[in-house]
Amino acid sequence: MTLDELITELDRGLRSMTGVSRMSRPVPVPPSSVQAAEMSPEERAHAAGLMRVNHVGEVCAQALYQAQKLATRSPALKEAFESAARDEEDHLAWTARRLEALDSRPSLLNPLWYAGSLAIGLAAGRLGDRVSLGFMAETERQVERHLDSHLDKLPEADIESRAIVEQMRVDEAAHGKAATDAGGVELPFPARALMRAASKIMTRTAYYV
C-alpha cells in the first residue's frame, strides 16, 4: 500500500468514527404523494434508536470493506470493495443526517464497533478471496433482513427514516448478490450463527448507547 492510499484509508476511518461523512448521492426522500405526520416524543426516540443502530451498521461496514480491500491482492476485488464502501459511506451520511433531524446522536461506542469490525474483516480476508466474498455476501444478507425488520418497527409517521432504510436495503441486496456472483462461498453454519449473535449484541447495545 502506498502512502497516499494509507492516508486515504486513515481519513475514511476517522470520518467513519467521528460522523464526518461525505455522500455521493442525495438523501432519499419519501414519495411526494406520501404526507408526513407529527410523531410523538416516544416515537421520535424509538426512531432515533433504530437509526442509531443503522448508523453503527454503516460504521462497521466501512471498517469491514477497508480491511477486506487491504487483505486482497486482486485489483478487481479491491475495486469491488471500494465501490461497496462508497455506497456504505452514503448510508453513513444519510443515517447521520437523520439522527440530527431526530435531535439524537450516533453511538458513543463507534470507535469500538469500528475497531472490532476492522479486525474481523482482516481475519476474513486472510482466509482467501472466496471466503472473504462469502463473508461479504452473508453480512449483506443479514443486514438486509435487519433492515426489513426496521421497516416493520419504524413509526408509520416517520416516512423520512423509512425512505432512507428502503434505499439502504436495495443497495445491500445488490452488494450481497455481487459478492456471490464474484465467487463467494457459503459460510458454514457455525460462522453464520456467530455473526448473527454478534449482530444482536451490537444492535441491542447501539439502540441505547
Image (cartoon, grey):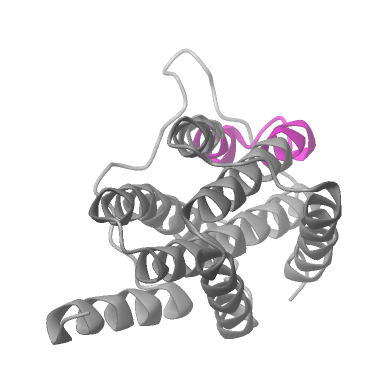
Which residue is depicted at the point 54% across and 60% down? 99
Q: Which residue is at the front of the view, 155 or 50? A: 50
Region rendered in magenta: 147-165
Residue 198 in the image: state x and y as whole percent: 79, 65
Q: Is residue 207 left or right of residue 55?
A: right
* Residue 187 lies within the magenta run: no
* Residue 163 lies within the magenta run: yes
Q: Is residue 28 above or below residue 139?
A: above
Q: Is residue 88 left or right of residue 11?
A: right
Which residue is depicted at the point 53% across and 37% down? 176
Q: Is residue 157 left or right of residue 131?
A: right
Q: Is residue 66 above or below residue 135?
A: below
Name the magenta segment's main secondary structure.
helix
Q: Is residue 3 above or below residue 208?
A: below
Can you say which quadrant of the picture contains the C terminus? bottom right
Residue 206 in the image: state x and y as whole percent: 73, 68
Q: Is residue 90 above or below residue 121?
A: above
Residue lying farthest to the top in this orientation: 33
Residue 115: quarter of image: bottom right
Can you say which quadrant of the picture contains the N terminus? bottom left
Residue 157: quarter of image: top right
Which residue is depicted at the point 52% across and 34% down? 180
Q: Which residue is at the front of the view, 164 or 142? A: 142
Which residue is depicted at the point 65% across and 38% down? 141
Residue 124 in the image: state x and y as whole percent: 58, 65
